[in-house]
Image (spheres, rainbow, N blue to C red):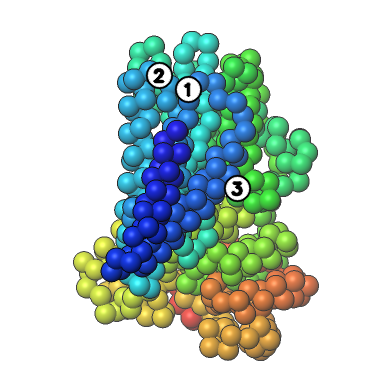
Amino acid sequence: MKLRNFFALFLSLVLLMGLNGCAPGANSSSALITVKLKKTQELNTRAAAYWSESKKPQQIGEPVSVVEYAAPFSYGLQYPKTGYQSVDDMIAQAVAERRAAFDKKYLLPENLPESGKPSADTALFLRYETYLTEDGNLSLVLFEREEPADAAPVTQLYILHYDLAAGTAQKPEDLMWERFRENASAYTQKYFLETEPYKKGLFGDYKKTLASDSSTFDRFALTDDGVLFYFEPYQLFPGSYGLVRLTIPYEDMRAKAAPPQAAPDIAGFDAEKPMVALTFDDGPNPRNTGAILDTLEQYNAVATFFDLGSLVERYPAVVQREIALGCEVGSHSYNHKDFKKLSNAEISNDVKAVSRAFQSAIGQEPTLFRPPYGNTNQRVNGQIPMPLVLWSVDTLDWKSRNAASVMAAVKKAGNLDGKVILMHGIYESSAEATAQLVPYLLEEGYQLVTVSQLIEAKYGETPQPSKLYGYDYFQ
């Protein structure tokens, strides 16, 4: 009803402006109103399509729908009204917090378009699912989709718990019983390793993701049938699997856990055989880094990505996929400044900003640091709480922007055993070169490893914080 009244008001305004078209500026005002009405209708269509993805009948409440265009962004939000006032107030507050976080993120200078002004075409969508148990525990699952005007969409999932009778919020740990995590870990590992199509799709360090001490099992909904866990794209499987749901029956969640099935490491390698590390700077980039990851996934290969903190914030899904494929992710600073020109305080602030970005995107710190332009000195090294890594083969892909030239540079380098190859993850030509380079290196007998794996296996050293692993080190 509210939406109908909203559109009726806009139509009335359009008609009114039409009747008074002879007034100064009336035509332009009418045109603006018409454009806004059209945009709002388009937004409503997009929102309705997103909301319809929650096809499961909701177990409680009626939907509250919000569609707004240009305030300063666009919003298509839907959440439940349960009829329990205190719970409804908390749900409304949670939605308001998600909206405020969205506004704050896209009002940051690095996330604004070139005009420097917010774009109403940047939109936030929210939909939900509800699960209600016999004893009055409500699990509310919020699905969030950010659609920047000039970037790839970002999806996130949040699960909230409420005790309807008490009118209080509940923490996940309040709802866990003895052996909750251990049983969830054992069941999911066994299930995914034995069940099609999942057993062929597992990638990356899935055993760590499904370990009993993993935060993976903090996100669950309590249903009539069991405990429902959600696994987002690239958390365990390729993006083509989409959002994976798994309900573990209550009897299995309360039984004595069986030890998980042993399985070989997917990204294992032989320390006695030739190896080389591919590295990619300046990402992540949804299109071109994504194409590089497609190649790595196709050949079950890994690389090391030195990502910019500002772009990690903007494209977290790309970094999540890097991690999911077993790749190593390091820092290339927050926004590519020359560290030799920064003060110690400025370096410290940069390191902290990058740490926040990585923690938010993948829940961990970057493992390595590559100084922008390769510029560093003893003072800078001492301020970096990570190993600093340069390279030994420079493809100059940023200069040639040509896949054939990249291939020629690698072949010219001769024996690549123990070498670190420098490329960039933001150029289409570099992605094209990677599609040729990966199979070439494998055919030549090289194993593709991460930089940390290379340092440990080839040089017998655990990478040390503040130590520079420079050009000469990898010769």
Look at the numbered disc 2 and give the secondary structure of its residue. loop
- Find disc 3 in the rendering and name its residue: 233
Q: CA distance from mark 1 to mark 2?
A: 7 Å
Q: Amino acid at mark 3?
A: Pro
Disc sitting over residue 83 in the figure: 2
Q: Quadrant of residue 279?
A: bottom right
Look at the numbered disc 3 and give the secondary structure of its residue. loop
- Find disc 1 in the rendering and name its residue: 61
Marks 1 and 2 in Cβ contact (< 8 Å): yes
Q: Which of label 3 and label 1 is nearer to you?
A: 1
191 on left or right of 311: right
> x, y percentage for residue 291?
64, 67
Foreground pick, 126 / 364? 126
Foreground pick, 369 / 138? 138
> x, y percentage for residue 437?
69, 76
Disc sitting over residue 118 in the figure: none
> x, y percentage for residue 91?
38, 30
- Up the image or down, 369 lies above or below 60; here it is below
Image quadrant holding the N terminus, namely top left
Question: How many C-alpha atoms fall within 10 Å of the one at disc 3: few (<14), some, or many (≥20)?
Answer: some
Question: How many C-alpha atoms fall within 10 Å of the one at disc 1: few (<14), some, or many (≥20)?
Answer: some
- Up the image or down, 209 lies above or below 463; here it is above
Write the residue at 63% across / 74% down.
431
115 on left or right of 423: left
